[in-house]
Image (spheres, rainbow, N blue to C red):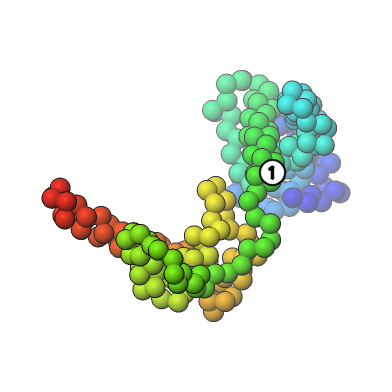
Amino acid sequence: MKALMSNWNKLKDEPTLRLIEMFQDNKSTESQKENAFHAICYRFKDDVLKRSEIVCKRFGHDITVAEQVTTATFTSYAKKGGFLIQKANQQDVDDAFKSYLFKIAKNELTNYYREEQRKKNYPYDGTERIITELPVLEGMKLSIEQSIILKAIESLTPSQRTVYLTYSQYEKLGFNLPKKLLQELRQQLGDISQTTIRTYKKEAFDKIKSFTEVMKLTEELSDGKI
């Protein structure tokens, strides 16, 4: 949020609760909210930064990370604006609000750590390509289950098959497909939405599942288990 620098200084000495109420009140004008938010940042930024530095050092992070966490903390508060003094454990408003911000900062540090781990373990390298057809399997000996899955894939519509094969090849647990690959996939299938992609994916995987379930049921019937 960008505050009007000529106005926010007028709020420097306002009580913290008044600033919070002004920022969180839907009836406040955008200008009032911006200036109240800037005054809040001015008052509490150093406290959040000091706390972030202490915690970051404990985990081997430097001041740069603490600064990132501090910025993310106020950005998060700006989006939610959910502080309620009635729910605070401390009676002093400033102490209560600092505790509230510290909790946000803790969550943001956790988010930072997860994002760093995600980057380290990111399974994509930019070589991913859309897959429209199965590879040539001539001469390969397939099991009954593999043959049935192959028939199921062949029964899909071209769009369903493209989505199914691309996701089957590249989707990794905990990761979305690369943004570039998803954009190319949507364009290739006629500039469709990601919602339509998800629909094709569900239809395809459901159909494959139904084929394998029928196969298993047939096997159980032939073995006399049912």
In the picture, measured across the screen, residue 184 lies left or right of residue 159, that is right
Tell me which amino acid carries mark 1. Lys
Residue annotated with mark 1: 120
Pinpoint residue 31: horizontal percent, then vertical percent. 73, 52
Q: Is residue 162 visible?
A: no
82 or 186: nearer the viewer: 186
The picture places residue 51, in percent across and down from the top left corner, at 75, 26
Q: Position of residue 101 (x, y in %)?
A: 67, 32
What is the number of callouts on the image?
Answer: 1
**Nearer to us in this view, 28 or 139:** 139
Observer able to see residue 57? yes
Picture quadrant where residue 8 is located: top right
Q: Residue 149 vs residue 167: left or right?
A: left
Q: Please identify the residue farthest to the front as the structure is shown.
A: 139
Tell me: residue 165, above or below residue 56.
below
Which quadrant holds residue 155?
A: bottom left
Q: Is 130 in front, or is 30?
A: 130
Secondary structure under tag 1 reads helix
Q: Which residue of the protein is positioned furthest toward the right in this rendering?
A: 6
Question: In the orientation shown, which residue stands out farthest toward the bottom?
Answer: 190
Task: Identify the residue shown where x is 16% and y is 55%.
Answer: 222
Identified at 25% across, 55% down, the residue is 216
Indicate whether 193 appears above or below 14: below
96 relative position to 218: left or right: right
Residue 167, position as x, y percentages in the image: 51, 61
Residue at the image point whose x is 71% and y is 32% from the top: 16
Whether residue 3 is situated above or below residue 18 in the rendered picture: below
